[in-house]
Amino acid sequence: MKKRSYPVVNIGIVPVFTICVILCMVTFAVLSYMSADRDFRFSSQVAEQTTAYYDAVNEANQQIASLNQTLLDSWNRGVYEQTESSYAFSVPVSDTKELIVELTRIEPQPDGSCTRIERFEETSTTKWHGDDSLNLIK
């Protein structure tokens, strides 16, 4: 009689399929975690930049209000024409950005404003150095 030989490793299709499914699930879980972590870091950075910008805007608005009050006081004292016709200042937003404000003096309005905003923009304080070179062949 012939002896039957069995394979050394006797694994069925179900355990192999289960291992493949578990590996796929672990891979997708790690990818999901990495994506969520990257999104969290990016949204935190955007929130910090937005907060810094609006803090600078608030400070600029306070300076504009103070200037309007000073000009209104000079209007009431009759020395309005002796004041400067334009004003400019900048408020730092971050290490590399600032908020530039330029104002022009106008006659007092019913709402109490004595200036017109000519420029109110965020600009970079650093010089940009672009590198367009591509090293394709050495």
Image (cartoon, grey):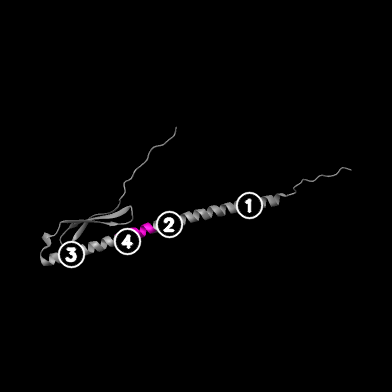
Q: Determine the CA span between mark 3 and mark 2.
A: 40 Å
Q: Residue at x 36, y 60 (%)?
A: 51
Residue under numbered circle 2: 43
Identify which amino acid the numbered label 1 is placed on.
Val
Q: Earlier in the sequence, mark 2 or mark 4?
A: 2
The kind of residue on which mark 3 rests is Thr
Q: Which residue is mark 1?
A: 21
Split into 4 quadrants, where in the image is the C terminus?
top left
| Picture coordinates of residue 49, whole percent (x, y) | 37, 57
Res 110 visible? no
Q: Is residue 19 visible?
A: yes
Query: Along the polypeptide, which appears first: circle 3 or circle 4?
Result: 4
- Label 4 element class: helix
Q: Nearer the viewer, residue 91 or 113?
A: 91
Secondary structure of the magenta portion, mostly?
helix
- Image location (x, y in percent) of residue 132: 38, 39
Where disc 2 sits, the SS reads: helix
Q: Which residues are magenta?
A: 48-56
125 inside magenta stretch: no
Q: Circles 4 and 1: CB distance less than 8 Å?
A: no
The foreground one among 43 and 97 is 97
User: Mark 1 or mark 3: which comes first in sequence?
Assistant: 1
Dot 4 corresponds to which residue?
A: 55
Q: Nearer the viewer, mark 1 or mark 3?
A: 3
The answer to if 54 sits in the magenta stretch is yes
The residue tagged 3 is: 70
